Amino acid sequence: MGNKKRTVKTVWLCAIASILALVSVAVIYGDVLLYTLYAQQKQSKDDSAGALPLPVLRATHTPGLTSAPTADLTPAPEPTRAPAFGDIQNVNFPEEDTGAGADYSYQSDELRIAVNKVQEFGVTYYVADIWMRNISCFRTAFSSGKYRGKRESPEKISRDNGAVLAVNGDFLGGLAIRNGVKYSVATERAVEPTPTPTLTPTPTPTLTP
């Protein structure tokens, strides 16, 4: 009876030892397999890092095979000026710069002025060529800013009214109309009739033989 128990115990011990041996072999095999996979992945990364990049093929343009586009040298049309209130009809307003070479010049879309200084025969005077498109460019002004105001220099009157070109005028004698306003009328004077000349016949000369 005692021998039988020892035999069963020995069988169990052998079975347990066999199981442990199989487990140890499985663990060792798993470690070897994992190490092999790790080594392969590392080698693959190293090969990818050291590999040369593949060339990329691109289409190239060969000069001379196709004609280059021709630049459009046509100038853009300038905008046309819209008609405005006060435009002078049938005025030949120049589009070019009229002040080229002048002593003084003012150029705009509404007004062109060219002033030249002339000295001849011991006299100095100024000649102004004026082209005006709109009547609003022409204005008159009073000294001191009012009718019958005190005397002022033309320079001060020009500055006060922002004039581009100023010309001194009269002393408001007779009919005075400024900027469409009538300030005075002409004084009526009696006109004497022109006498009718008396025609006297010329005597006929007498010829004596």
Image: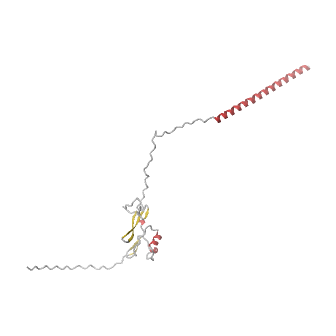
Colour scheme = secondary structure
Using the image, determine if residue 14 lies above or below residue 118: above
Residue 109 is situated, as x and y percent measured from the top left of the image, at: 43, 61
User: Could you tell whether 142 is left or right of 55 in the image?
Assistant: left
Task: Report the front residue among 176 and 51.
Answer: 51
Quadrant of res 131: bottom left
Q: In the figure, is residue 75 to the left or right of 42?
A: left
In the displayed structure, 24 sits above or below 4; it is below
**Front-lying residue, 125 or 198:** 125
* Residue 48, quarter of the rendered image: top right
Count of numbered tags? 0
In the rendered image, residue 57, in percent from the top left (x then y), is placed at: 55, 36
In the image, what residue occupies the spot 87% across and 22% down?
Answer: 10
Residue that appears at 89% across and 21% down: 6
Q: In which quadrant of the rendered image does the N terminus lie? A: top right
Relative to 70, residue 29 above or below: above
Image x and y of residue 21, in percent:
80, 25
Q: Eyeballing the image, is 126 above or below 45?
A: below
Q: Residue furthest right?
A: 2
Residue at 84 percent across and 23 percent down: it is: 14
Residue 193 screen position, x and y as percent: 27, 79
Residue at the farthest left position? 209
Quarter holding residue 82: bottom left
